[in-house]
Amino acid sequence: MPTRDEILAILDTVKDPEVPVLSVRDLGVVRDVTVGETGAITVTVTPTYSGCPAILVIEQDITAAIIAAGHGPVTVRTTFTPAWSTDWISDDARARLKAYGIAPPGRTEQGGLVQLMRARRTVQCPFCDSLETEVRSEFGSTACKSLCWCRSCRQPFEEFKAI
């Protein structure tokens, strides 16, 4: 029977289908893993968006990776509470996002007043570190990213939005 830590190590190999430099654990999508007395495994995940188109692929990839390692049966349970936050992305994953050419998200503000308009921080270019950037589109290749432009090195890049 596998341990919880062994299953977590397997989940470190399951890549996010939209950002292949990150695992589902790096993103904070995996919320919990339990191994029952019979060896049955339950993995609880929280999608990055309630309508995330990749969640079914993520569930299938998690199940396939655990079964390929010789364990199971596997149940992948989805929970929306608490809602996923970019604050759950590890610091190491943020560095890999930047190295991959995607500006990592800033930290979300905790508490305080709810703003009626979206506050926008300056996005640092992942290529030259310049703050002379602008958002060209609120949506990039996926809904969780925006398309930006660096006026300094003249490179387009995506930003992983902070939510």
Image (spheres, rainbow, N blue to C red):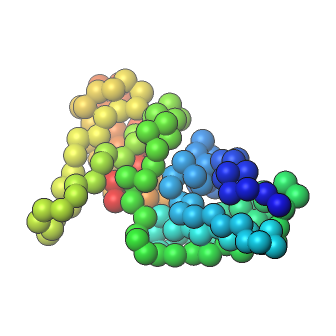
Does residue 4 sit above or below 12 in this rendering?
A: below
In this image, 152 relative to 37: left or right?
left
Q: Residue at x 46, y 75 (%)?
A: 80
The image shows a total of numbered marks equal to: 0
Is residue 57 something one can see in this rendering? no
In the rendered image, the quadrant that contains the C terminus is: bottom left
Would residue 148 be found to the left or right of residue 42 on screen?
A: left
The residue under the point 51% across, 68% down is 46
Residue 30 lies in what quarter of the image? bottom right
The image shows residue 152, relative to residue 87, as above or below, that is above
Along the viewing direction, whichever of 154 and 10 lies nearer the viewer: 10
For residue 78, what is the image quadrant?
A: bottom right
Instruction: Work out whether residue 101 or residue 87 is closer to the camera in this orientation and state it.
Output: 87
Of residues 34 and 97, the one drawn nearer to the viewer in this rendering: 34
The quadrant of the image that shows the N terminus is bottom right
Query: Residue 64, position in %: x, y?
Result: 80, 62
Q: Whole-percent x and y of residue 4?
A: 68, 57
Return the residue nearer the eye: 134 or 68: 68
Where residue 12 sits: x, y (%)? 66, 47
Q: Residue at x 62, y 75 (%)?
A: 77
In the image, residue 32 sits, relative to residue 121, either above or below, namely below
Q: Which of the 4 quarters of the picture holds residue 152? A: top left
